[in-house]
Amino acid sequence: MLSYNMDVEPRSRWLRTTPGAAALAQPYYCSEAGLFYGREHFATARTDKESYILFYTLEGAGLVEQNGAQVTLEQGSALLLDCRTPQSYCTAPGQKCWHHYWTHVDGPGVRALVPVLIPGQHLCPVSLPGVDVRSFFSNILDNVRTETSVSAIDVALAIHQILAAMAHQRLTGGAGSNRATVERAADYLRAHYSEPLCLDELIQSAHMSKSYFLRLFRQYMGTTPYNYLLCYRITQAKDLLVLTDLPVGAIARKVGFADESNFSTRFSSMAGQSPLQYRRSALQKK
């Protein structure tokens, strides 16, 4: 259900489209986009919609509410919101206007960034100083209804540029102590990758709950501690396969695997070929 008070200036724009095959093939696509020059009484409330909505404030401020929490979206700030959960947004109290771009977006690229931009379904406005967000949204509005392969790529790229800038700011611009904790954990995994490692000990040294540590690690490193360690071990094994003549079993032990069979299974799954096949193909390329 959607209800709204469309208190906007006549120059506002609201464009709708039905994403075709070319758009749906992209990691990012949109179904609606607009530029609203919202006045004092602009307001929208929605129970559910199968997409995310991306806001960016040009002037004034908006008030966004979801899951009992409220955030103010000030000038120069962006916000990604999951529309599958009831939400409302309006011109912020005390403001005469909320001039803002918006677009309903979805796709695997959007969903991959949700843990960073909507962690735990919390509303997280992101200030984007020095980022030309206007041009990215302008590109979306110019191409969203063209419905060609090229326009689908242009829209996807513009959405990616906005969301990537937001994610970069979230990961580098704040919560420095949390980031440092995760980076120390990753450093420890790389330094001790050849040894038996216990996740509980790693979490204990971080002085935080297991669930919080795992969420932070995934947010900053893009994967779980176990998968991060596994990828690092396989990378080291690739170097040993190419740069030494050690047998596979010896390499398995050197990179932290207890037995050759488990190592070979993991290696084949991640590299797409067995350790010996990888060695032969790498040496043939020299």
Image (cartoon, grey):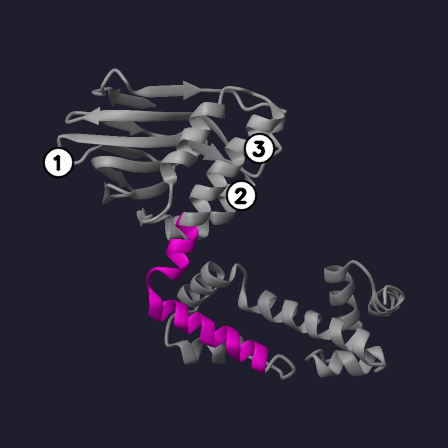
Q: Secondary structure at mark 1?
A: loop
Specify whether 204 is left or right of 269. Answer: left
Read off the residue under disc 3.
Answer: 153
Q: Nearer the viewer, mark 3 or mark 1?
A: 3
Question: In this rendering, does residue 83 appear at all?
Answer: no
Determine contact: label 2, label 1, CB under 8 Å: no
Q: Image height check: is 223 above or below 208?
A: above
* Residue in the image at 75% along x and 61% along y: 271
Q: Image height check: is 245 above or below 93?
A: below
Residue type indicated by callout 1: Pro
The numbered mark, 2 or 3, whose residue comes first in the sequence reads 2
Instruction: State which region is magenta.
Output: 166-191
Was residue 169 drawn as part of the magenta stretch in this picture? yes
Q: Secondary structure at mark 2?
A: helix
| Label placed on residue 93 | 1
The numbered mark, 2 or 1, whose residue comes first in the sequence reads 1
Toward the viewer: 73 or 257? Answer: 73
* Image spot of residue 59 (x, y percent): 22, 35
Read off the residue under disc 2.
Answer: 109
Residue type indicated by callout 3: Ile
Which quadrant does the C terminus fall into? bottom right
* Image spot of residue 111 (x, y percent): 50, 44
Toward the viewer: 64 or 149? Answer: 149
Crowding near pointer 2: few (<14 within 10 Å), some, many (20+)? some
Q: Where, by quadrant of the figure, is residue 73 drawn?
A: top left
Residue type indicated by callout 2: Gly
